[in-house]
Amino acid sequence: MFPASFDYHKPGSIEEALELLTTLGADVKLLAGGHSLVPALKLRLTQPKHLIDLAGIAALKTVAVRENRLVLGAMTTHWQVESSPVVKAALPYLCEVAGLIADPQVRNRGTIGGSLVNADPAADYPASILALDAEMVCVGRGGRRIVHARDWFQGLLTAAIEEHEILSEIRIPLLPPRTAATYLKLRHPASRFAVVGVAAIVTVTQDQRCAEVRIGITGVGSCAKRAGSVEQQLVGHRLDATRIEAASAAACDGLEIDGDMHFSAEDKEQLCRTYVRRALLRTMHLAESGAFQPTRNAP
Amino acid sequence: MKRTISVTVNGKVRRESVEPRLLLVHFLRDVLRLTGTHVGCDTSQCGACTVSMNGLAVKSCTILAVQADGAEITTIEGLARDGALHPIQAAFREHHGLQCGFCTPGMIMAAKQLLERYPAPTIEQIRDQLDGNICRCTGYHGIIKAIEAAARAMAEKGQAPTTGS
Ligand code: FES
Ligand code: FES
């Protein structure tokens, strides 16, 4: 399969990329790792006149901890997240998530920014981005804008980025003390996409009550969502198996789940409830055994 | 508009003028005539097209040749040294790691990265790291045996797994 013809541009800075983005007209696509876009070009699902390759922009490749946040440049590859000593020290949970994406070759190329802008309904990162309450920094010629995770995923393949903007970095707040985290995924046996993926992040008090919980779900709906009704039933309580089971019954609230060629809507709903329950059980198991994520510095 | 790219392939600098839509795998196979890299699925699934790009295993059917401008590429043709097979190649031959051989170049390039990252891999690590490669013949057991044997052979010789790149 061959993509249709296009012109290729490789700017060396964000400014230069923004300039191209505004002057080349409407028929432009930004190229990050290319592991969603190149297949789409080959299938001619998209036929842009211009591609702007972001690979030459060093500013999009930051991996650092700043002001109690893990800062990931949009062009950070999944393998870089999986293997980075910085990420491992600050938020090892995210290394695990990155290591579950696709396969090693794809992880060498695919980027976190590309994944978040593409907003594939079965991508892995979105569940964690929601559960971690991350912020996306979008730059345009008029300056920069910060979008919170809860506003980012707007629908099928739709993220809250404007036409002439570039996602430059993702900022992930480091976690408070006594916080455990799990990402549990049912991998599609062929594609390795998430049939359902659940990110559960729970902060517990000394007596093992749930002080704070955020649950992100990917795979089953048109885009990733927080499981708000489940979260509400957990805060303030001791999370034993009974409470978790009861709360997980609400896992599909607010998710519009449709069947597809592999699974009926009912099957997906059942999987969604099951994976939310199991992710919470595993997180509580981690919390009880003291396997917490590293803690942010005291303010 | 065509662009001139310069790519170091198996140690040799190649300068060519290419259309931006040309895929890396076609650049290797059709422009440079290095046909050891195969196209299986053409949809980023099978790994037959795996090559090493700046030391990382990548699926060359999912990369534009222009994205490889300035890169160092190693293909299956670049592994043997002075007529001697790379230890991974030798182990595949010895341990029945192939039948028809179609997936083999990609398997070996994936195995090369696997052994660089995990020089003494467990069977689970081997299986996990070969997730991006599909073989339609062998049932994988021979491949896994071959990679275990290659790991041992390379450790015995004290040979850095990067040999040949
Ligand atoms: S041909 Fe590239 S992954 Fe199958
Ligand atoms: S040996 Fe035939 S496809 Fe693997």
Image (spheres, coloured by chain):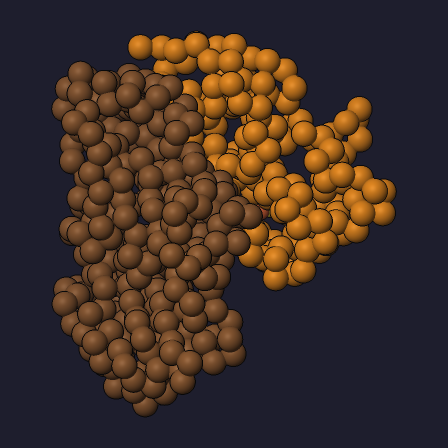
Residue A238: percent from the left, percent from the top? 34, 86
Residue A126: percent from the left, percent from the top? 30, 54
**Measuring 29% from the left and 67% from the top, which residue is drawn there?**
A214
Between A6 and A226, the one lying in front of the other is: A226
**Measuring 35% from the left and 54% from the top, which residue is drawn there?**
A173
Q: Quadrant of residue A244?
A: bottom left
Task: Reply above or below: B12 against A246.
Answer: above
Residue A148: percent from the left, percent from the top? 22, 50
Q: Quadrant of residue A255?
A: bottom left
- Quarter of the picture containing the C terminus of chain A is bottom left
Task: Reply above or below: B10 against A111.
Answer: above
Identify the residue at the far right of this view: B157
Q: Quick check: A271 left or right of A83?
A: left
- Quarter of the picture containing the N terminus of chain A is top left
**Measuring 19% from the left and 17% from the top, which residue is drawn there?**
A24
Residue A105: percent from the left, percent from the top? 50, 42
Identify the residue at the far front of this view: A299
Q: Is residue A135 visible?
A: yes
Spot the brown chain and give its letter. Answer: A
**Measuring 29% from the left and 18% from the top, which residue is drawn there?**
A16
Spot the orange chain and give its letter. Answer: B
Task: Reply above or below: B44 against B52.
Answer: below
Q: Is residue A190 visible?
A: no
- Tally of numbered tags: 0
